[in-house]
């Protein structure tokens, strides 16, 4: 009996195709379903990868918004000081100062963008059913 077990083990190890087939075979008593730890591409990602992806997206968006606010603040400050014949290097503003000064420069463009988004969302509820009816006709 020990000889048969040793021979079976040697056959499994020596034949890579058979070993791969036995590794991917469903476990006994599972009704042919692959094991839960198969890790196929159809499995939904876990909590931590989704949290990491969401935080990376939020940090990226926050960085872009901060850079845009800094730019708007710097341009506003530069044009304001240029009116008086001064350069921005004469004032010792920090990044926070430029970002806070961007509020006045970016207020109306952001209000227009927000209004456009609200109007687009309101129109979407009315236009989407019409488009679906036209595409099926």
Image (spheres, grey):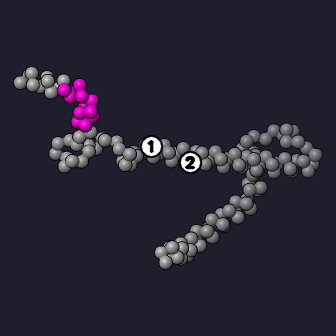
User: Which of these two is toward me, 18 or 73?
Assistant: 18
SS at badge 1 = helix
Contact (Cβ within 8 Å) of mark 1 with mark 2: no
Residue 52 locus on image (x, y percent): 48, 43
SS at badge 2 = helix
Label 2 environment density (alpha carbons within 10 Å; few <14, some 14–19, many ≥20): few
Residue 107 vs residue 55: left or right?
right
User: Which of these two is toward me, 58 or 97?
Assistant: 58
Instruction: Specify the quadrant of the image occupied by residue 18.
Output: top left
According to the picture, the residue beneath numbered tag 1 turns out to be 49
According to the picture, the residue beneath numbered tag 2 turns out to be 58
Q: CA distance from mark 1 to mark 2?
A: 14 Å
Evaluate whether residue 26 shows in this view.
yes
Residue 97 locus on image (x, y percent): 75, 45
Residue 11 vs residue 62: left or right?
left
Residue 125 locus on image (x, y percent): 54, 73
Evaluate whether residue 125 shows in this view.
no
Q: Is residue 25 above or below residue 129?
A: above
Magenta-drawn segment: 11-22
Residue sitting at 14 percent across and 24 percent down? 7
Residue 28 locus on image (x, y percent): 17, 42
């Amino acid at each position: 009996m020990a000889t048969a077990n040793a021979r079976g083990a040697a056959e499994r190890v020596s034949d890579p195709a058979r070993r791969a087939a036995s590794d991917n075979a469903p476990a006994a008593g599972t009704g042919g379903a692959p094991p839960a730890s198969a890790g196929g591409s159809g499995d939904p990602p876990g909590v931590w990868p989704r949290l990491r992806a969401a935080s990376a997206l939020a940090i990226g968006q926050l960085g872009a918004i901060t850079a845009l606010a800094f730019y708007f603040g710097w341009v506003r400050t530069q044009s304001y000081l240029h009116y008086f014949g001064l350069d921005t290097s004469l004032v010792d503003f920090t990044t926070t100062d430029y970002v806070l000064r961007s509020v006045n420069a970016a207020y109306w463009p952001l209000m227009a963008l927000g209004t456009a988004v609200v109007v687009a969302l309101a129109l979407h509820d009315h236009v989407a059913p019409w488009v679906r009816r036209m595409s099926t006709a």
